[in-house]
Amino acid sequence: MIQYSPGSMLAMIQEENKICSQDTTLEYLILLLSKVALNTLVLSFWLRSITKTLLGVCSILIYLADLLLICSIFWAWLFRENHGTYEVVCFSLSYSSAVYSLLPLPVLLAGALDCVIHQHVGFDQKSLGRTAVRCAVVLLIWTLACFYSFCYTNTELLTIQYKDVKALVCSVEGSVAVSHFSLILFIILGYILLFHCRKLPRWIRLANKLAKQRTGSLSMSDLDFSRNLEKLESGAFEDDYMDIMQDRPPLSISLVLCFALNWTPYVLMSVTCDLLGFTVPAYASVNLLWTACANSFLVGMAFWYRSNKHGPFCTLPDDICPWSFYWYLSKENGQFTASTKLKTEPSILQTLQ
C-alpha cells in the first residue's frame, strides 16, 4: 500500500518492469481469506447473543459482504488472463473500501441508540420484532453507504510510470472512524490504568478468585447456588469476601479493567499500526474484531447504568467480557442483596452462564 492522501491510499494491482510482470491479485485474495478466517473465529465466540444488538446484526452483514468480495477477487484471479480482470479487482477494492469507510460512525451511533432504547426493556427479552427493526436499520445504513459510494467513488484503474517500472494502481479508502475510535479507547484505558497501576495486580487477582468461585458454582443445583450467594452476602465466605471489601475499586474502574483485559491487545495493535504509518484499507480494518470491541464498549456502558438496579444479574448481549463477576470488585454496590434478586430475576442463572 502506498500512502496517497489522508484517509486514502493507492492499492497496487500489477507491477511491470523490463524483466518480469507481477500480479498482486493473489495477495489480496489471501488477505481477504485471512480476514474471513479471523471473523469466523470471532463469530464462533459471539453466536449466542449476536442478534441481540445492532452491532451484532451489522457484523453478520459484514461477514456476508466479505464473502461476496472474496468471490469477486477469486473470479478475477481465476481468469486473470482475460481482458478486464484488473478493472474488476480495482472496482471491487475501491468500492468495498469506500463502503466500509462510511459504515463505522453511523453504525456506532445507531448501536448506541439501540442500547439506550432497550435499557428499560432489557436485552434478555427475546423479540422477533426488535430483531427485525435492527435488521431494517442495518440494511438502511448499508444501502445509503453503497449508494453514496457508487455515486462518488473513483474506481478508475490508474497507471504510474517511474523510470523502468510501470504499475497499475487504484484508489482505496482507510477508515478514519475506526482509527479515531481505537485511539480514543487507547488514551482512556492508558490514563485510567496508569493512574491505578499499583493496585491493578491485586484487583486482577481478586477478579480471578471471583471467576473461579463463579465457575465452581455453575455445576451446583439452583438451590445450592442460591444458598451460596446468600452465604457470600452473610459472610460465610468471609476470607475471600473480606479481601474484596478491603480495597475495592469504583464500579466504573472495575468495568474499565474488565474491558481492558479483553480488548487491550486489539486496541494496541490498531494504534501501533496507525502510529507507524501502516495504514490499513477499510475493507480490512472494518471487521468483526472491531464490531465486537465496539459492542463490548457499549454493553459495558449499559451494564454500568443497569447494575444499580439489577446488580451483577442483568442480562447483556456480550459474550467476550465477563461483566458479572467484576461487579463484585466495586465499592459502590456492596450492599446488593443476592437472595432478593434471585427471587425477582428469573433469568439470573442463565445470565451467569
Image: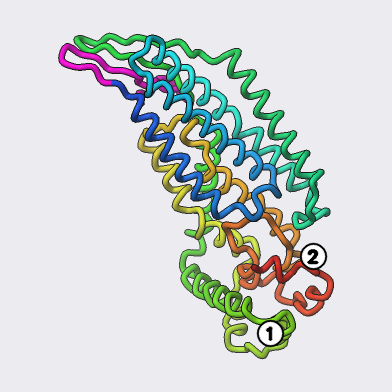
User: Dot 1: within a 10 Å radius of its alpha carbon, few (fewer than 14), some, or many (20 or more) residues?
Assistant: some
Local SS, label 1: helix
Amino acid under disc 1: Asn
Q: Quadrant of the C terminus?
A: bottom right
Local SS, label 2: helix
Q: CA distance from mark 2 to mark 1?
A: 21 Å
Label annotation for residue 70 = none
- Is residue 74 inside the magenta stretch? no
Q: Position of residue 270 (x, y in %)?
A: 45, 42
Task: Report whether 328 appears left or right of 263.
Answer: right
Amino acid under disc 2: Lys
The residue range painted magenta reads: 1-22
Total residue callouts:
2
Q: Which residue is mark 2?
A: 309
Q: Residue furthest left?
A: 19
Q: Which residue is mark 1?
A: 228
Task: Report whether 163 appears left or right of 76.
Answer: left
Q: Position of residue 49 (x, y in %)?
A: 66, 53
- Is residue 12 inside the magenta stretch? yes
Residue 113 found in image quarter: top right
Task: Report whether 73 appears left or right of 128.
Answer: left
Residue 105 found in image quarter: top right
Q: Main SS of the magenta segment?
A: strand
Q: Quadrant of the N terminus?
A: top left
Query: Which residue occupies the foreground of this view, 304 or 50?
Result: 50
Q: Residue placed at 48% from the left, 36% from the top?
A: 285
In the image, is residue 176 above or below residue 306?
A: above
